[in-house]
Image (cartoon, helix red, strand yellow):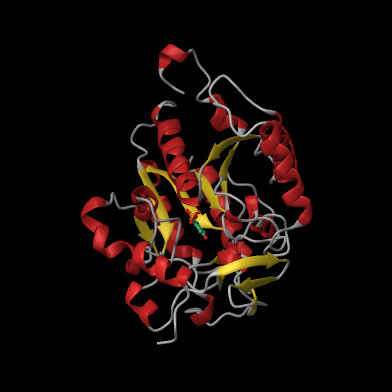
């Protein structure tokens, strides 16, 4: 093994890195990045790298973006944080106004959350509670498709479908319902992009038609299943899903954490289908990686189901 720097030695002494095997770091020590500039980052030895993974899909505007750096510095000198129950602040208000303006139609309200996984958790809780307090307490189940990834917390793993991440936690997880989704790499109907009518929706259609009465929501990554291997599918699938979920009073929860903010050529990927979800999760690019924060956008209809006297316990 090469000679390690002091920082590398200290890193290996204390830090348990995610999504990698610490044993491998003995052969490939962590690359300690000390500087960032646009597309490039530099390590402690002066080696330059092009950040092709955009720091795990979060860095949309380059490292140390001068405009973002400037406003963040101004903000921390003015106000760093304030309790959000009964209080508010200008930056949050402005973000709320601007985000709802560019969001798919109907998503007029938003809830601040901490990271992608916690926005998934909040979506599930919201949908569940909505049905419970609008006369459909039997609607308790959440459906997702195979290859789904919605985060790493226990609730988010329940609607995830990547066995590699979930298997060991099975005894802890309240599992959602898995339905076979699109697989455009090996289309079982022999279709191509030109002639696809999202025939594969039949699996979802059958399941929702048979069990719709117990289902609170369907959660899906819009257009691209990122963690499953950038699996792109037809917007027709989302169109059909929107139509049927509306008919059956099932929430369509769009996970735009990875694909939101322009990654697929539209501001939000679900726009390719020309439909709006009931609930939409955004994260990652939302802060361009500057800090962990996510947002859950919801419709007025959902919001109104929680609007009551505090003593009613609907908040
Ligand atoms: C990254 C990701 C999440 C989880 O976000 P975290 O901020 O890592 O908790 C959820 N869904 C999708 C589609 C993601 O890509």
The residue nearer to you, when weighing 241 against 252, is 252
Residue 215's place in the image compared with 55, above or below, is above
Q: Give left or right: position of 254 versus 270.
A: left
Residue 46 quadrant: bottom right
Point 52% across, 80% down: residue: 185
Q: Give left or right: position of 126 versus 297.
A: left
Residue 161's place in the image compared with 30, above or below, is above
Q: Position of residue 223 (x, y in %)?
A: 59, 63
Point 46% across, 36% down: residue: 126
Which residue lies most toward the right here? 67
Which residue lies most toward the left here? 171
Residue 224 quadrant: bottom right
Q: Position of residue 40 (x, y in %)?
A: 69, 72
Which residue lies most toward the front here? 6
Residue 121's place in the image compared with 53, above or below, is above
Q: Position of residue 81 (x, y in %)?
A: 59, 32
Point 67% across, 66% down: residue: 36
Numbered circles on residues, count? 0
Q: Position of residue 113 (x, y in %)?
A: 52, 40
Tell me if residue 96 can be seen.
no
Q: Where, quadrant-wise, is the N terminus in this rendering?
A: bottom left
Residue 91 quadrant: top right
The residue nearer to you, when weighing 46 against 65, is 46
The residue nearer to you, when weighing 224 against 118, is 118
Residue 108's place in the image compared with 159, above or below, is above
Tell me if residue 240 can be seen.
yes
Q: Give left or right: position of 141 versus 98.
A: left
């Amino acid at each position: 093994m090469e000679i390690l720097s002091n920082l590398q030695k200290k890193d290996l002494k204390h830090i348990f890195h995610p999504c990698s095997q610490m044993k491998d770091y003995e052969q490939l020590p962590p690359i300690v990045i000390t500087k960032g500039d646009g597309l490039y980052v530099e390590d402690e030895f002066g080696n330059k790298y092009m950040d092709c993974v955009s720091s795990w899909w979060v860095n949309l505007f380059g490292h140390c973006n001068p405009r973002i750096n400037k406003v963040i510095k101004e903000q921390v000198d003015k106000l760093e944080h304030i309790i959000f129950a009964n209080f508010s602040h200008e930056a949050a208000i402005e973000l709320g106004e601007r985000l709802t303006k560019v969001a798919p139609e109907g998503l007029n309200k938003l809830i601040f959350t901490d990271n992608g996984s916690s926005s998934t958790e909040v979506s599930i809780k919201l949908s569940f509670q909505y049905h419970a307090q609008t006369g459909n307490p039997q609607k308790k189940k959440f459906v997702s498709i195979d290859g789904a990834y919605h985060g790493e917390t226990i609730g988010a793993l329940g609607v995830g479908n990547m066995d590699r991440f979930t298997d060991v936690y099975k005894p802890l997880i309240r599992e959602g319902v898995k339905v076979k989704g699109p697989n455009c790499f090996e289309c079982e109907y022999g279709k191509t992009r030109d002639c696809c009518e999202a025939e594969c929706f039949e699996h979802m259609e059958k399941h929702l038609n048979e069990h719709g009465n117990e289902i609170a929501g369907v959660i899906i990554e819009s257009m691209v299943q990122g963690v499953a291997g950038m699996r792109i599918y037809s917007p027709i699938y989302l169109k059909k899903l929107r139509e049927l979920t509306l008919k059956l009073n099932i929430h369509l929860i769009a996970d735009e954490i990875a694909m939101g903010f322009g990654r697929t050529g539209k501001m939000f990927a679900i726009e390719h289908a020309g439909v709006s979800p009931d609930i939409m999760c955004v994260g990652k690019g939302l802060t361009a990686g500057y800090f962990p924060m996510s947002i859950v956008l919801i419709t007025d209809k959902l919001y109104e189901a929680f609007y009551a006297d505090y003593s009613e316990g609907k908040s």
